[in-house]
Image (spheres, helix red, strand yellow):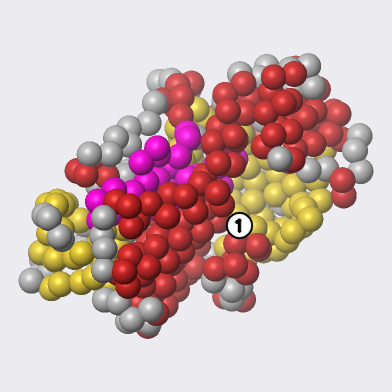
Amino acid sequence: MKRFDVIVAGAGPAGSLAARYIAENGFSVALLEKRQEVGSPVRCAEGVSEKWLLKHTGVEDSWIEAEVKGALLRAPDGTTAVMNYSEKGYILDRARFDRDLAWKAAENGAFLLTRAAVTKIDPHDDFFIVRTDHPVHREFRATLLILADGIESALAPQLGIRTTLAPSDIEMCLQYTLEGAPHEEGFIEMAGGNEIAPGGYAWIFPKGGNRANVGLGLLGSRSMAGFNARFYLDRFVAQRFPRASVIRTVAGAVSASEPLEEVCGEGFMIAGDAARLANPLTGAGIGNALESGALAGETAVEALKAGSRSREALEPYKQKLMRSIGNTTKKFYRIKEPFVKFSDDDIINMIRIVSQIDPNRVTVAGILEAAFKENKAVLALIRKAFFS
Ligand SMILES: Cc1cc2nc3c(=O)[nH]c(=O)nc-3n(C[C@H](O)[C@H](O)[C@H](O)COP(=O)(O)OP(=O)(O)OC[C@H]3O[C@@H](n4cnc5c(N)ncnc54)[C@H](O)[C@@H]3O)c2cc1C
């Protein structure tokens, strides 16, 4: 049986970053990935803010399919507001991005194993036995465990952590990559409305030329037989891009919940989507996955150096995570709750107000303030979330 200081389950951005950091610091780490090929099939619209890449991975030309300088926010009646970003964004080639991050971990000494779904975790006093469905490497032993197995988050329950999401805390998403879909270059578009994507929004993310990721997410509690993501997306695409060809289909879910209360315990930490760290309002999760993976890796290294795997030794992970992204995610969750109940008129009013602001001065906080101008309680929350 192979023994490692750390086993990381899941080679998405969170897991690969954690594994790379641990390997770079001279500890042995196995990165176990269920899929045959890291990063494929893609389950993402591939948008990311440059700040996260600069902080954690650098920016490689081969990852970038389009640069984004702002967003168009479209109301059901066609009213459109423009928001120029203060920081650049990118649309990634996510398959390549994920693959390169995992390969970088391997280059630095991590043992990367694909087609190795972690199936069973047996906790012992000072270590874990981790079983996989790999035909050869069926059992591993590790001092620490980092669970980065994404939205399914099926492993944490084996360690007593409940990860079930309520239907009102999950966005059901479907996306087509379209060829022949002319759009505004340099801008993503987000379209809201109860006839477009109930409790969510539709997006158009540029992929270069006339290619775009066009998708939508709707709240699980508002997805019904016959009125599901496919129904809404097919209708949206027929209206906006009747001549386009579908060259790729992506289906998946994004959590729209608070982060897990328990993101670490005796010998283990939970990172990325598995810890419910995607932004509950926008669904963006790549940046938070990178950040949490880096923090989990850093904490693992500190604990191993200190020779302790206790809950207390791993507690700094939770503290740093909450300070950096967790508390903000919680606040977005509290704002999401009233937001998903908006009528079409509310959305039109919000976008009308925002459309009158100079695009260089439009901020997320400004949009939310416009949305909740009548609701003092939510306004107070927004001000606390963004200005305190
Ligand atoms: C349709 C859609 C569009 C999205 N668009 C965006 C966007 O534009 N921008 C953005 O920032 N975010 C977006 N997201 C969210 C984003 O994709 C996730 O937040 C991000 O991938 C989280 O990274 P992660 O490393 O935590 O998990 P993942 O990237 O999901 O990686 C988890 C990995 O674990 C593996 N795994 C699962 N179970 C096991 C197991 N038992 N053993 C071993 N391996 C396992 C999986 O195969 C996977 O490779 C989107 C999501 C969806 C569904």
Image position, residue 272 (x, y; %): 43, 52
Image position, residue 186 (x, y; %): 75, 57
Image quarter where the N terminus lies is bottom left
Image position, residue 160 (x, y; %): 22, 39
Decide if ligand 1 comes within 8 Å of the CB at mark 1: yes
- Please say if 148 is above or below 22: above
Picture residue at 36% right of the left edge, 41% below the top? 262
Residue 354 or residue 42, whichever sits in front: 354
Q: Name the image quarter holding residue 63.
A: bottom right
Q: Residue under label 1, please give it.
A: 48
Query: Does 202 sit left or right of 78 as displayed?
Result: left
Q: Is residue 356 visible?
A: yes
Residue range of the region highlighted in magenta in the rendering = 257-286
- Please say if 226 is above or below 188: above
Q: Identify the amino acid type marked 1.
A: Val
272 within the magenta span: yes
